[in-house]
Amino acid sequence: MEDTVIRPIKSPADHTAALHQIDALMVLDTLNATQRAELEVIAILVEKYEQDQFPIPFPTPVEAIEFRMDQLGLSRAELSSLTNFRRLERQARLVPRTN
């Protein structure tokens, strides 16, 4: 493989070119030290570009719980029975708040 110039990724075209460089390195059976270093640097640049260009927001706690419920196929009633939420809710009303 010929020497490749590693440049910052500043555009979608740069991103595509970097992904092609990664593909070209990944199909090789073995990588020498220079190629391993090149692959690592390009992967870091791609990761940074993707984090900046395609941010993934964190879910709210409710969204996270609903997502997990969907994965497990749980209804709200089933979750409530699993967590004893009603019992905890009743206990919370019985315990006076100390603020």
Image (cartoon, rainbow, N blue to C red):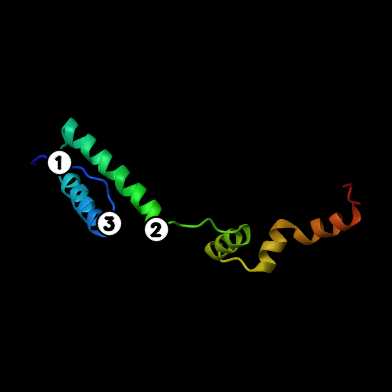
Residue 32 or residue 16, whichever sits in front: 16
Q: Earlier in the sequence, mark 2 or mark 3?
A: 3
Residues marked 2 and 3 touching at CB (< 8 Å): no
| Amino acid, disc 2 | Phe
| Picture residue at 22% right of the left edge, 58% below the top | 13
Query: With respect to residue 4, does 55 lie above or below?
Result: below
State the residue position of label 3: 11
| Picture residue at 88% right of the left edge, 51% below the top | 97
Query: With respect to residue 71, does 98 lie above or below?
Result: above
| Amino acid, disc 3 | Ser
Q: Residue furthest left?
A: 2
Question: Which quadrant of the view contains residue 55?
Answer: bottom left
Q: Earlier in the sequence, mark 2 or mark 1?
A: 1
Number of residues whose C-alpha sits closer than 10 Å to that of mark 2, classed few (under 14), some (14–19) or many (20 or more)? few
Query: With respect to residue 19, does 75 lie above or below?
Result: below
Q: Which mark is residue 54?
A: 2
Residue 23 or residue 85, whichever sits in front: 23
Which image quadrant: the N terminus?
top left
Cα–Cα span, label 2 and label 1: 31 Å
Question: Which quadrant of the view contains residue 11?
Answer: bottom left
Cα–Cα span, label 3 and label 1: 30 Å
Residue 85 locus on image (x, y percent): 75, 59
State the residue position of label 1: 29
Cα–Cα span, label 2 and label 3: 13 Å
